[in-house]
Amino acid sequence: MSIEPSQVLGASSPPAAAWIIYALMLGLFAATPLLWRWIRPGGPARRQWVMGESAVVLAALLFLSLAIAGFALMLLAGTVFKGVSPEKRALVALGPAEVVMFGVMLVINGLARPRGTHRLGLERAGVGRGIFSGMATFALTLPWVLVASLLVSWVVTRWHLDAPLQHDIFRLWRSEPEGWTLFKVMTFFSAVIAAPLAEELVFRGFLQTLLLRLSGKVWVAVAVTSVLFAWSHGAWTMQVPIFILAMGLGLAYERHGNLWTCILAHLMFNAVQFGLFLLQL
């Protein structure tokens, strides 16, 4: 998902609220040099062990995680949620499928790799550090994501392009009845909880680590992972700002070696999107 520009600086926003948003964005931009040290590459060598990893094992973990997620999604959509309309069924089943994949892959990762949880950066002892660095990563990345969203919106409007500026989840939310329906509960759970867990495990934990092992270069691993992460998120109008987000998450992972950092920043980003959307209803 990406932030719809009108949710942030829409024409319906009162002048006072718009000025507050501008001030917050300027403040975050001003703080960039201070926050950058929390995610810049070239800091402490947190992941120097990667070059000793087995590329075959990493590739197997990556493809197995995708296979488990796909199988769980089809099984849940065809059984538990078969009563949901076809257009919404996959979105409703996605969150539980992602949680299943995350749990199963944690076990398999621990069996396949020595100190597997430590190498992912998912130890319980790292949660506190992950919260702090995740908040810093989110604060540093969000202004640039907003700017990318605004530029995409300007391009679409300026050249009258037929391209969506809002995720399908938000479009389908508007077609739901009042109150918290099954679709609303499950898609909120998927976006804010399940997706940050599953996507960070797959893209940063496995894919980026594999690309770093193969290339030996942080920027190659982060950039390629970010492109693939953005590509998996729908239309190009969504992909541009999500690429910026993914670059921040990837650099933070290399800086800290802590996957909780990426999970929390991703969670906060999706939560902000939902919060802005709900304020527009």
Image: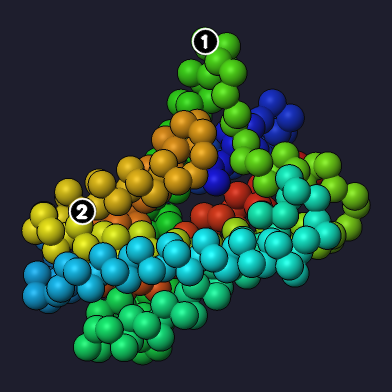
Considering depth in this image, is 209 or 261 the residue closer to the camera? 209
Look at label 1 and name its amino acid: Trp
Whether residue 236 is situated above or below residue 168 in the rendered picture: above
Residue 35, horizontal then vertical, whole percent: 30, 57
Whether residue 109 is situated above or below residue 203 in the rendered picture: below
Q: Residue at x 42, y 55 (%)?
A: 139
Tag shown at residue 221: 2
Q: Determine which residue is flagged by label 1.
A: 159
Q: How is the image coloured?
A: rainbow
Mark before the other along the chain sequence, 2 or 1: 1
Q: Residue at x 33, y 81 (%)?
A: 109
| Mark 1 residue element | loop
Tag shown at residue 182: none
State whether residue 253 appears in this view: no
Look at label 2 and name its amino acid: Ala
Q: Residue at x 60, y 49 (%)?
A: 273
Determine the residue located farthest toward the top in the rendered image.
159
- Rounded to the nearest whole Å, what is the CA distance between mark 2 and mark 1? 34 Å
